[in-house]
Amino acid sequence: MHDIYIYQSNIDKHIQNLGGYWRSISALARLQEEIGELAELILEKNSKIDELKEEIADIYIISTCLANQYKNNLEKVYNKIDIPTKTKELQELSSDHSVTDLFFYIQIQAGKIARIINHYDGDKIKKPTEKDRNLGLEVAFLHKYLFLLANNFKFNLFHSIDRVLKKSAKRDKNRFSLMHDPTTTLSLKRYRALINQSTGKITEKKLWGSYEWNSNRSIENNIEKSVPSFIHFCKCAQIEGLDGYVFEISASDNTNIEVLNNLLDVLSIHKLKVVRSSNLICIQQIPFLVELYKNKDGLQYIVFLTQ
């Protein structure tokens, strides 16, 4: 296991200890805020190196959060573009680029990330001729320029990341209002517990999940609350390599098929194109294999697995 995987996991644990992730488009705004603050420091003649260290670490952490939300394995992505995955080797990266050039490259990558997130989670509709871009790949390139910038200023970026995480653990606990995050939702945790109990093995699939079931709402209202999240999933699943989406629904007295039919009816009402065949269900032109599970508390899990 290489160092970069450990750092990605530590950042994920840190965010979950604080309560969970923001919407990715909110995290994107935070990323741009930190890049703006870095620009101010670079332009200042007497800027303090400690402030530069913290801003560059903030950009690394927030961009890693975006990668985590879309289930990107940064170790694998680094390998694709020949970036080392060990901290010692990353500290030895160098280039002939000036600080100004490296900052411009960071801003270019932030723009590419913004374009992707706006397609997935914002209001911008992707042009039919526009090439698919993988978020993890663009984050990895951003990280490369962050390492080069940190090395240019002659400091260990990972030491700065450790300090920022330690500081944030105290400062940011219960500081922010949190929104539903499909990668850390309670429904997904309960589904994983069910699979673990029945198979003895935690599923390694890259999954998103619906809002947890609310017994005070009707089936239709529960499903409707998660429709935006599922639409978001349909936009990014194939590009980011996500494996599936889990809906948590109370089975009550209905059969598995009746619950599935109710779910598909609600999705159709919300203008998602649903086409059923003998063994697959196509939603928004994405073919899904559907698996059905039920736990001892009467909660049913409808899992749409990408093919």
Image (tube, rainbow, N blue to C red):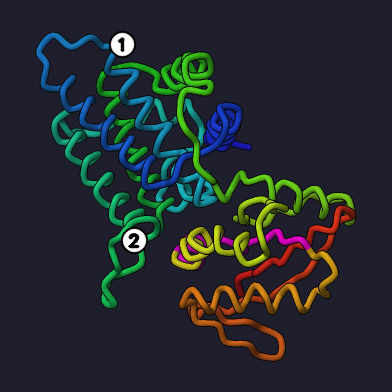
Is 249 colored magenta in this rendering? yes
Q: Is residue 281 above or below residue 172?
A: below
Quadrant containing the C terminus is bottom right
Q: Nearer the viewer, residue 18 or 254?
A: 254
Element class at badge 1: helix
Q: Position of residue 43 (x, y in %)?
A: 11, 21
Q: Nearer the viewer, residue 4 or 9?
A: 9
Q: Position of residue 135 (x, y in %)?
A: 40, 53
Instruction: Residue 27: name its quadrant.
Output: top left
**Relative horizontal placement of residue 127, taking residue 89 as reference (left or right):** left
Nearest to N terminus: mark 2 or mark 1: 1
State which mark lies toward you, 2 or 1.
Answer: 2
Residue 119, numbered label: 2
**Relative horizontal placement of residue 235, taking residue 44 as reference (left or right):** right
- At 42% from the left and 46% from the top, the residue drawn is 24
Point out the residue furthest to the bottom here: 278
Q: The disc labelled 1 sits on which kind of residue?
A: Asp
Q: Which residues are magenta?
A: 236-250
Mark 1 highlights which residue? 50
